[in-house]
Image: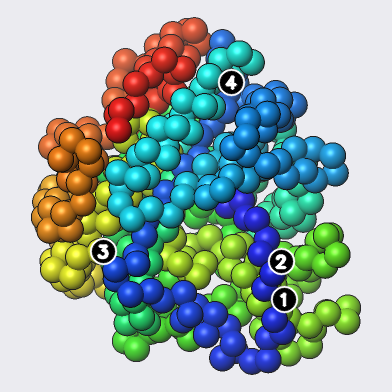
Amino acid sequence: MTTLVKSELDEPVASTRDLIDYLARRAKPAVRWGIGAESEKLVVEAGTGEAAPFERIEALLERLEGSDAWRGIREDGHLIALIGESSSLTLEPGGQLELSGKLCADVHCCQRDLHRHIGQITREANLLGLTFLGLGAQPFTPLEKIDWVPKARYRVMAPYMERCGGMGQRMMKQSASLQVNLDFSDEADCMEKLRIALALAPLFYALFANAPLLEGRPTGYLSFRGPIWNDTDPDRTGLLPQMFRPGAGFATYVDYALDVPMYFILRDGAFLNLTKERFTFRRYLAEGVEGHRATLSDWDLHLSTLFPEVRLRPQIEVRSPDSLPPHLTLSVAALLKGLLYDSAAREEIWSLFAGQSESDRQTLYRQSWKLGLKAPMDGRTLREVALDTLAIARRGLTRQQRYNRRGEDETVFLEGIEEIADSGITLAERLLNRWPESRAEQVARLKRHCGFPGEQVYLNP
């Protein structure tokens, strides 16, 4: 969710055509398509598993800033992000650490980037008594005891979240996810990929379910991130049913975004709060606000505050999976690359979901959070659909012929989740099996399940 504002986009917006063109000009020929992996991790106290206070997380960033690789970004004197040559480290509202990795030609490149990142952060965290969990929700710490990262945008968003949904602040402070960014060649290609990725959201919640705990207790869900997002803000979350309608295109997405209430605009380094009334971008474009007129930078910032399962920013960003253990983190990128960067795979995967109605998608969406791979779909289970989906992705990756130095193609990144689908037992169910009673044993279980230990050899590239 963290966004670094693109202040260079100071072009004024004359009409909605400019907003549509802003999405369209992100198109690339297939030979230039890349894959971008973003991974959020919970930062916790190594001994207790409690959420680390902000001052400890800031100390971690300060240690990382001491290397030549990063340039610090400060706000009101606090270090809140690190910028590298081709990637960034940012903080979500509750201190979750997010790597926005470099845009890569293949998942092997993403792996090398992630491998360096994990080695760097775990070395420094160990010295501070911190560790990281690849888990979709904070396992122990109550909402009110998690520090807010001191960013001005969060001071605007937090009160608004309380008014428009019951779990918006839980989303901000207690959840962690993975995102994958994908390219497209033109409007038709973008819409095809967007629809497929939206249809896949329930499968992604089920296959990557890894958020069964909250505030020290099992929630009754395998991915409690689903209910959290569902009760965050109905204006800006969900499955975007309008994108499945015949003729949907860039203009459809722009119409949706225009009618979502704005949080703010940025002027002279400060956020102008627009949440006191329902002030949409459509109204802003027509009227302006306090003497300010809409720019493409405002539009880009607004797009970053929309949180559907898949969004345009203006690249395609898939947002459904829970945060995962380090050895599975790139399985999401590999699965999507296999399905969406191969035309035959796109045709095959869409054939599995094309017959769904809007009601079917919504029902499956909600069932996936609780039932995982046991959720029913068209007389089958999501486990069976997952096995078919992984086979399609494997064929797609094989045809793409991208190899590492050992001669392995990108299908190596599917192996961990193929084992989950084969067994039908999600990460969440494995974590909860014989869940211990003592906190010490619970913390030890979590570290084995999804921890980032300093000496871990992570799929050495």
What SS does tag 1 mark? loop
Q: Is residue 9 above or below residue 230?
A: below
Q: Is residue 298 above or below residue 46?
A: below
- Residue annotated with mark 3: 340
Q: Residues within 10 Å of mark 1 (few under 14, many from 20)?
A: few
Q: Quadrant of the C terminus?
A: top left
**Which mark sits nearer the N-terminus, 3 or 1?**
1
Separation of marks 2 and 3 at Cα, in angstroms: 31 Å
Q: Residues within 10 Å of mark 2 (few under 14, many from 20)?
A: some
* Image position, residue 375 (x, y; %): 24, 48
Q: Quadrant of residue 194?
A: bottom left
Separation of marks 3 and 1 at Cα, in angstroms: 33 Å
The residue most toward the right is 290
Mark toward the viewer: 3 or 4: 4
Separation of marks 2 and 4 at Cα, in angstroms: 32 Å
Q: Is residue 192 visible?
A: yes
